[in-house]
């Protein structure tokens, strides 16, 4: 069986400016490259005379581990005309993919995120006669409610050869959008078990300069509104009444929504928590692991997620988790076994959950970690499942009469 020839397209991948961006996408692509011929294209948003290309993107390509990432400058106007992003992305990647296809025929285009990546790739794939697969990763929930973007997203999902959903909630969205059940498959993200695994908490605290006996709550997520860090800070203020020496550490970048980060800092000052809440900033994965190993509990109160890697990574380290049911969090977090699920935007419930977890002294970190490993597997397993789904769908398309597959492609739009 010949390896599939795949071009993967994703705007969100690690860059020198943001080394943590899209790391879960990169991990899947790297694992897939072991069994498939992979080309990776990264559209890079820019606005002439307003938002120039970053210096790293002015070269034709850069390398991430064993993968070579090819750059495709993409016209982008921040904050306005978002419904045109699919068309602009198609214009960005189209010539490059066309040259690749002419030099060596491509079996499929692998698009990450439904809009604009998926919509733009469907437009290119339809023009070049290349099947397109879309991975739904979470943003599609809110994009689907947009008056202008929603129809484009739904059209792209229906026109794709198949959709990979990283959660059951995203599969449900695809089905509600008219995607045939056999054309969508849930494949959760994995974790890098070589990096995220249980280890000595005391040693981690020593490396971080943290006291051995105090309670530590850790959260990992960019400082953006949908992560609801302000709700966690509110709950933590109440937790401090019971655990006066407790510390909250929030790990995540602030560049995406600088106004939200400023509001969060103001809230921390207003509640007198400057000495007990640490906004740590963006960290590389080895540093994140130390914070997770040092933690007594991990907390993330997102309003919306796809398959939340931060939750999976905390569980892989063996830390009990307090999280909302966003995405498939409730699939992985079970009350009393490895943490607690709390409603979105419910600070009192979060306070109670955090206190309950902190009071317990019998959490079995090895058991929490091993159960998660059985549930999701590693990135190699994920890659095998994705490639098997691709082959299954491609085989079905090859067997289908032309009149059966024409309706699925004739309505595709690029934006």
Image (cartoon, rainbow, N blue to C red):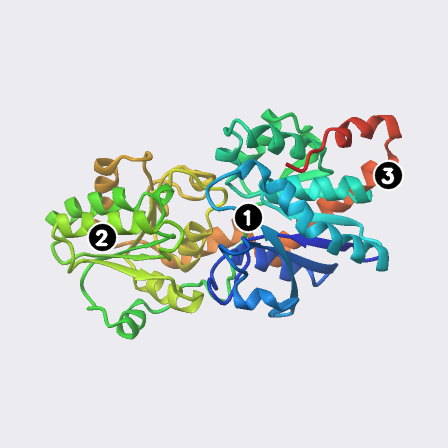
| Label 2 element class | helix
Q: Residue 344, can we see it? A: yes
Position of residue 205 measured from the top left corner of the image (x, y, whole percent): 27, 69
| Label 1 element class | loop
Which numbered disc covers residue 265?
Answer: 2
Residue under label 3, please give it.
398
CA gap, disc 3 and disc 1: 37 Å
Position of residue 386 measured from the top left corner of the image (x, y, whole percent): 67, 48
Q: Earlier in the sequence, mark 2 or mark 1?
A: 1
The quadrant of the rendering that contains the N terminus is bottom right
Relative placement, left or right, of 167 versus 88 is left
Q: Are marks 2 and 1 in contact (CB under 8 Å)?
A: no
CA gap, disc 2 and disc 1: 30 Å
Residue at 52%, 34% (x, y): give it: 143
State the residue in front, 305 or 349.
Answer: 305
Which numbered disc covers residue 76?
Answer: 1
Residue at 51%, 54% (x, y): give it: 373
Position of residue 248 measured from the top left corner of the image (x, y, whole percent): 24, 55
State the residue in front, 395 or 65.
Answer: 65
Query: Which mark is nearer the camera, 2 or 3?
Result: 2
| Label 3 element class | helix
């Amino acid at each position: 069986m010949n390896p599939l020839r795949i071009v993967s397209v994703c705007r969100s991948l690690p860059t020198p400016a943001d080394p943590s961006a899209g790391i879960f996408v990169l991990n899947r692509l790297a694992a897939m490259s072991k069994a498939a011929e992979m080309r990776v294209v990264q559209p890079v948003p820019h606005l002439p005379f307003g938002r120039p290309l970053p210096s790293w993107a002015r070269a034709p390509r850069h390398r991430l581990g064993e993968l070579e990432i090819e750059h495709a400058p993409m016209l982008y106007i921040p904050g306005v005309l978002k419904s045109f992003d699919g068309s602009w992305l198609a214009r960005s990647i189209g010539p490059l993919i066309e040259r690749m296809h002419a030099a060596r025929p491509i079996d499929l285009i692998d698009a990450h995120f439904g809009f604009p990546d998926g919509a733009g790739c469907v437009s290119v794939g339809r023009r070049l006669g290349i099947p397109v697969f879309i991975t739904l990763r979470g943003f599609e929930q809110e994009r689907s409610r947009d008056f202008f973007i929603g129809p484009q997203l739904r059209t792209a999902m229906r026109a794709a050869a198949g959709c990979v959903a990283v959660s059951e909630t995203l599969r449900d969205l695809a089905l509600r959008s008219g995607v045939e059940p056999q054309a969508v498959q849930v494949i959760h993200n994995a974790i890098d078990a070589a990096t995220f695994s249980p280890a000595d908490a005391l040693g981690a605290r020593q490396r971080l300069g943290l006291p051995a006996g105090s309670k530590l709550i850790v959260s990992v997520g960019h400082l953006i509104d949908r992560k609801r860090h302000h709700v966690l800070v509110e709950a933590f203020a109440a937790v401090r009444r019971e655990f006066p020496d407790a510390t909250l550490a929030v790990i995540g970048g602030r560049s995406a929504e600088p106004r939200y980060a400023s509001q969060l800092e103001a809230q921390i000052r207003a509640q007198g928590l400057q000495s007990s809440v640490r906004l740590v900033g963006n960290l590389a994965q080895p540093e994140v692991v130390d914070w997770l190993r040092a933690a007594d509990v991990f907390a993330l109160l997102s309003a919306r997620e796809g398959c939340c890697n931060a939750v999976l990574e905390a569980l892989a380290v063996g830390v009990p988790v307090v999280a909302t049911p966003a995405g498939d969090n409730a699939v992985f977090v079970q009350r009393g076994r490895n943490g607690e699920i709390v409603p979105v935007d419910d600070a009192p419930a979060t306070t109670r959950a955090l206190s309950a977890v902190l009071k317990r002294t019998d959490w079995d970190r090895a058991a929490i970690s091993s159960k998660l490993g059985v549930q999701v597997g590693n990135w190699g397993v994920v890659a095998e499942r994705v490639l098997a789904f691709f082959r299954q769908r491609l085989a079905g398309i090859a067997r289908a009469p032309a009149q059966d597959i024409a309706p699925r492609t004739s309505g595709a739009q690029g934006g």
